[in-house]
Image: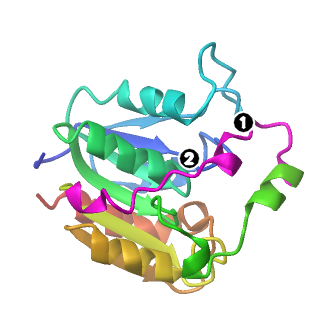
Amino acid sequence: MSGRPERLLFLPGASGDMAFWRPLGQRLACRAERRHLGWPGFGDTPPRPGVEGFDDLLALVLEPLDRPCALIAQSMGGVLALQAALARPRWVTHLVLCATSGGLPMAELGAADWRAGFRASLSHLPDWFATDTTDLSGYLEEIAAPTLLLWGDADPFSPVAVGERLARQLPRARLEVIKGGDHDLGLHHAGRLAPLVDTHLTRP
């Protein structure tokens, strides 16, 4: 799918925080509709019957993919964004992936293990993300959507080596590294990222 997006879908990471991307969304000049998704049972999003795992979360991401959309995703939300692009290539115009694993084997790329900290600090949340082992490394070359990869050079959980691997495997990817950026790059550096995202969304 090429062309301009009519809708921007913002996907959070494992916290499910719907507010994570709002500072960036408010700064974008792109006039497309904004839709911030949350994960049922996470953060401020109430539980939803029948949502019990990763496949159910993917189904929620696919629901609003009924028109040209750009997916803007943080961390584990990026895995869902890539799965959505594989499932609905007709409607995904652009991808913006921030500090994600991208379904790659993280340990061999020098990533620190975030799962113990997630369980300790967010023990009230469902454990789906911490137990997920989705491997997309054999499918990434099938994704045709132009992809902007946003990484911070101070992120222990998704180091720049992950972004570099994704940039090599995704056919139409470009990597931007933000000096001093941590894992919550999209929230803490929204002002620096907004021009990069706007430029990306105007490219066919």
In this picture, residue 151 sits left or right of residue 195: right
Residue found at x 57% / y 34%: 38
CB contact under 8 Å: marks 2 and 1 = yes
Quarter containing the N terminus: top left
Q: Amino acid at mark 1?
A: Gly
Q: Disc 1 on helix, strand or loop?
A: loop
Q: Which residue is mark 1?
A: 43
In this picture, residue 34 sits left or right of residue 46: left
Percent coordinates x, y for residue 104 in the rendering: 47, 65
Q: CA distance from mark 2 to mark 1?
A: 10 Å
Q: Is residue 116 above or below residue 89?
A: below
Q: Few, some or many C-alpha atoms within 10 Å of disc 2 (few <14, some 14-19, many ≥20)?
A: many
Residue found at x 42% / y 33%: 61
Percent coordinates x, y for residue 88 in the rendering: 25, 36
Q: In the image, which residues are magenta?
A: 121-142
Q: Few, some or many C-alpha atoms within 10 Å of disc 1 (few <14, some 14-19, many ≥20)?
A: some
Percent coordinates x, y for residue 174 in the rendering: 28, 74
Residue found at x 53% / y 62%: 186
Q: Amino acid at mark 2?
A: Pro
Closer to us: 164 or 97? 164
Label of residue 35 in the image: none
Label of residue 12 in the image: 2
